[in-house]
Image: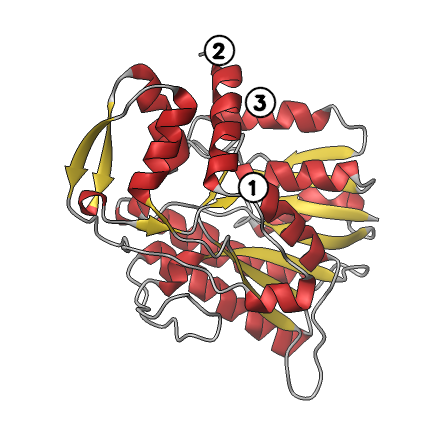
């Protein structure tokens, strides 16, 4: 049997592919290798995955139904699971290019779920949502039961739309699907537009870093080493429908430990061995001051147990960054 992973050249997708291959799965990776950030990093991830004989890759856009049908044609009868991670990411960029977000995150979700309806062996599709859906929620920690109908960025709105589409396909077509609301994931091979990557590069080069909201921010930073086991545990346990309920669930995937941004910077400074040059700026449109995941549901249903603090995880990232870029 085969597991299809979209966004396979992306940060979380790369690590999920590695974990699936290590446990003996055959993996079909799909990615369009867009230029939202340095394509060389995506290609370096793919190079590592291609070293596995059980990995196959197809370059395709998830929002292109014809391209996706072609990408899975040879494996169509064998695909038992899908980890759908491809998306247009980034809250701030959604203010600049809104069309890209609707195309990838809304149309892409529809294309993927329509594809699911044609796969005879499919047991479960796990897809990426985001903690950004909680944008207008003030009560912390953020619980899956909270009303999330007040998004404050287009990115968040498209991710919530993806969850609603997943619910509809579960209700109408019994497609078993689970959405994962990821909370600020960081770690080796991470995304260049995220804080760990941006700050590490700047500190090493002596450039200033910008702390928005004048540094008065907290984030539920979640190490990739804790995220991947959550994805696999959920993938292996499709939601049950019945009794009027659709086979669709949504879970938070976070550390449940909000960290002050200033503490995050202090840990990076210690790991790098150099002080940061800090500039303060007002809150950015679409951003929030604090995120904090309530992970009781995924702990109860899937035994999720994150254990990596930023004091442990950030030095691992810095070590990878130095090695990868020869710093």
Asked if labels 2 and 1 touch by Cβ distance under 8 angstroms, the answer is no
Q: CA distance from mark 2 to mark 3?
A: 14 Å
Q: Is residue 162 left or right of residue 76?
A: left
- The mark nearer the N terminus, 1 or 2, is 1
Q: Is residue 264 visible?
A: yes
Please give the name of the residue rendered at 31% of the width and 43% of the height, measured from the top-left corner.
261
Give percent across and percent down for residue 235: 70, 57
Give percent across and percent down for residue 123: 76, 62
Secondary element under disc 2, as helix, strand or loop, is loop
Question: Depth-wise, is mark 1 or mark 3 nearer the camera?
Answer: 1
Name the residue that disc number 1 marks: 224
Q: Which mark is residue 326?
A: 2
Give percent across and percent down for residue 102: 40, 55
Q: Is residue 92 left or right of residue 105?
A: left
Q: Which mark is residue 44?
A: 3
- The mark nearer the N terminus, 2 or 3, is 3
Foreground: 275 or 144?
275
Foreground: 82 or 206?
206
Furthest residue in direction top, as rendered: 326
- Total marks drawn? 3
Q: In which quadrant is the C terminus drawn?
A: top left
Among the 4 quarters of the image, the one containing residue 209:
top left
Q: Is residue 181 left or right of residue 263?
A: right
Foreground: 222 or 93?
222
Q: Is residue 199 left or right of residue 118?
A: left
Foreground: 251 or 116?
251
How crowded is the residue under tag 2: few (<14 C-alpha within 10 Å), some, or many (20+)? Answer: few
Residue 243 higher or lower than 104, as above or below: below
Secondary element under disc 1, as helix, strand or loop, is helix
Asked if labels 3 and 1 touch by Cβ distance under 8 angstroms, the answer is no
């Amino acid at each position: 049997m085969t597991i299809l992973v979209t966004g396979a050249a992306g940060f979380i997708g790369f690590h999920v592919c590695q974990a699936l291959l290590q446990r003996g799965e055959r993996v079909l990776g799909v990615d369009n290798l867009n230029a939202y950030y340095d394509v060389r990093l995506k290609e370096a991830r793919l190079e590592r995955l291609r070293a596995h004989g059980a990995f196959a890759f197809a370059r395709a856009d998830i929002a292109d139904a014809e391209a996706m049908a072609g990408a899975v044609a040879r494996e169509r009868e064998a695909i038992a699971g899908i980890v759908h991670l491809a998306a247009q990411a980034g809250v701030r960029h959604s203010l600049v290019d809104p069309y890209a977000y609707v195309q990838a995150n809304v149309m892409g979700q529809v294309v993927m779920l329509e594809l699911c309806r044609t796969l005879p062996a499919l047991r479960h599709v796990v897809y990426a949502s985001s903690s950004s859906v909680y944008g207008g929620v003030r009560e912390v920690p953020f619980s899956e039961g909270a009303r999330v109908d007040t998004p404050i960025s287009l990115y968040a709105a498209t991710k919530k739309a993806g969850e609603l589409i997943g619910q509809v396909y579960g209700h109408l077509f019994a497609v078993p699907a689970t959405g994962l609301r990821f909370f600020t994931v960081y770690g080796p091979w991470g995304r260049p537009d995220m804080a760990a990557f941006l700050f590490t590069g700047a500190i090493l080069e002596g450039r200033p870093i910008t702390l928005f909201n004048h540094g008065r921010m907290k984030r539920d930073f979640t190490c990739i080493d804790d995220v991947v086991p959550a994805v696999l545990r959920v993938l292996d346990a499709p939601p049950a429908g019945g009794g009027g309920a659709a086979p669709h669930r949504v879970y938070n995937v976070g550390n449940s430990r909000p960290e002050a941004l200033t503490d995050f910077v202090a840990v990076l400074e210690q790991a790098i061995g150099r002080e940061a040059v800090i500039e303060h700026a007002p809150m950015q449109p679409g951003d929030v001051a604090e995120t904090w995941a309530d992970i009781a549901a995924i702990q109860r249903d899937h035994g999720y147990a994150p254990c990596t603090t930023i004091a442990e995880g950030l030095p691992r990232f810095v070590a990878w960054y130095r090695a990868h870029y020869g710093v």
